[in-house]
Structures are given as structure tokens and as C-alpha cells.
Amino acid sequence: MEIALLGDRFTAKEALDMGLINRVVPTEELVAKTKELADRLANGPTRAYGNIKKLILASSDNSLEEQLQAEAETFGETVMADDWIEGVVAFNEKREPDFKGH
């Protein structure tokens, strides 16, 4: 609220320290770091990522009971997915998972 009302300026480091942004990178590394993050997301458990996003977006409109129910249902669906099994197996085998989005 203070930032919105007062409009004080702050540096990227201060924004990072306040938790307004997740990372700061030098300009010359921006494209490479962005691609690295995009690749990480694209190669991750995309179905689970979608479920997480859906739950977070719905949370402000749901009652606590509705949100807990939605999370329980989504968790049940997620643990039945091939990517869940791959993640568990990869963890046990101490290797990187090979997610397929299923």
C-alpha cells in the first residue's frame, strides 16, 4: 500500500529485498536467463504447474472449505498422472525426471 500511495522510487536490489521480484540479472544475461527459466518450466511437470496455477487463481474467490476441496481433488488427479510416477521414480533413482506432461 505504501508503494502504491507514496510512489517512492527504489532500486532493483530493493525490489528484490522486498520480495516484489524474484531475481535480478545483468542486462547482458537477461535473454539467456529468461531462456533458462522458460526451458526449466517447459521441461517440468507442466500438468502439475497448470493445476497449481488454476488453484492459486481460484483461491481468492473460494471459501476455505471450497479451496481445500479443490486442492484435495486436484491432488488426487495429480498423483494418478504419469508425471507424478516419473517424479517419484526419478527421485528414488537420484536422477533428473523426464516429464511428458501426462
Image: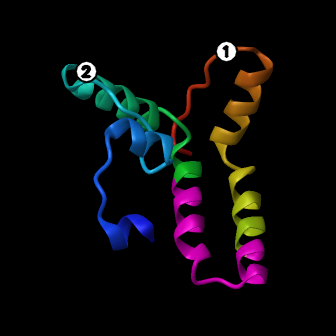
Q: Secondary structure at mark 2?
A: helix
User: In this picture, is 38 found above or below 8?
Assistant: above
Identify the residue at the far top of this view: 94
Residue 46 left/right relative to 79: left
Which range is magenta? 50-69
Image coords of residue 75 (percent x, y):
74, 58
Magenta-span inclusion, residue 102: no
Q: Earlier in the sequence, mark 1 or mark 2?
A: 2
Residue 66 in the image, given as x and y percentages of width and height: 73, 82
Q: Which mark is residue 29?
A: 2
- Judge whether 92 appears above or below 56 on screen: above
Nearer to me, 22 or 31: 22
Q: Which residue is mark 1?
A: 95
Which mark is in front, 1 or 2? 2
Q: Determine if the magenta segment contains residue 60.
A: yes
Given the image, on which type of amino acid does mark 1 rest? Arg
Give SS at disc 1: loop
* Residue 59 image offset from top left, x and y in percent: 61, 74
Mark 2: amino acid: Glu
Q: Residue at x 76, y 15 (%)?
A: 93
Q: Is residue 23 left or right of residue 65?
A: left
- Determine whether 73 is above or below 89 in the image: below
Horizontal side of 23 relative to 27 (left or right) equals: right
Which label sits on residue 37? none
Task: State how far apart marks 1 and 2 are (Cα).
Answer: 28 Å
- Quadrant of image for the C terminus: top right
Among the 4 quarters of the image, the one containing residue 39 = top left
Density class for disc 1 (Cα within 10 Å; few <14, some 14-19, many ≥20) is few
From the viewer's side, name the closer residue of 62 and 4.
4
